[in-house]
Image (cartoon, rainbow, N blue to C red):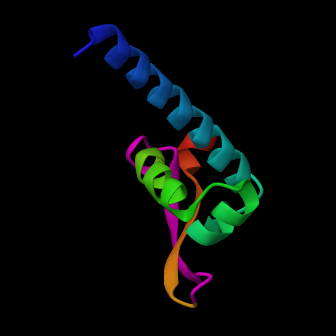
Amino acid sequence: FDPQTSRDAAESARELAARHHRIILDALSRGPAGKDRIAALTCLSGTQVARRTCELHRAGLIEPTGRTVASTAGRQEREWRIAISAGR
């Protein structure tokens, strides 16, 4: 166990998450979108988008629109938008 290596890895993960957050927020600044549409706009994987949208939602930066949209597989998924309170 190397504490410095662990700290470095944690910092790297935080930086990656922050970069993904910015990319997703930029995509949503163009209008509401579902996970698969966000993934297509950003070149992030659907898994990365799902993880980060959860984090952004908990932080109050994005919110579901209340509508669903078709995923690339034809299933319904939540549509996300920039949180109204975040835009103030």
For this orientation, the residue located farthest to the top is: 4
Magenta stretch: residue 62 in it? yes
Q: Residue furthest front?
A: 1
Residue 28 position, x and y percent, is: 68, 55
The image quarter containing residue 70 is bottom right
Residue 19 percent across, percent down from the top left: 61, 35
The part of the chain drawn in magenta is 57-73
Res 46 quadrant in image: bottom right
- The image shows residue 21 at horizontal and vertical percentages of 57, 41
**Along the line of sight, the residue nearer the viewer: 74 or 66:** 74
Q: Which residue is painted at 45% across and 20% down in the image?
A: 11
In the drawing, does residue 42 fall left or right of residue 19? Answer: right
Residue 78, x across and y down, in percent: 50, 73
In screen coordinates, is 11 left or right of 87? left
Q: Nearer the viewer, residue 10 or 18?
A: 10
From what the image shows, is residue 19 above or below residue 50? above
Tell me: 47 left or right of 4: right
Compared with residue 17, is residue 72 higher up or lower down, i.e. above or below? below
Residue at 72% across, 46% down: 26
Which quadrant would the C terminus be assigned to in this image? top right
Q: Residue at x 49, y 54 (%)?
A: 53
Residue 63 seen by the camera: yes
Residue 74 falls within the magenta-colored stretch:
no
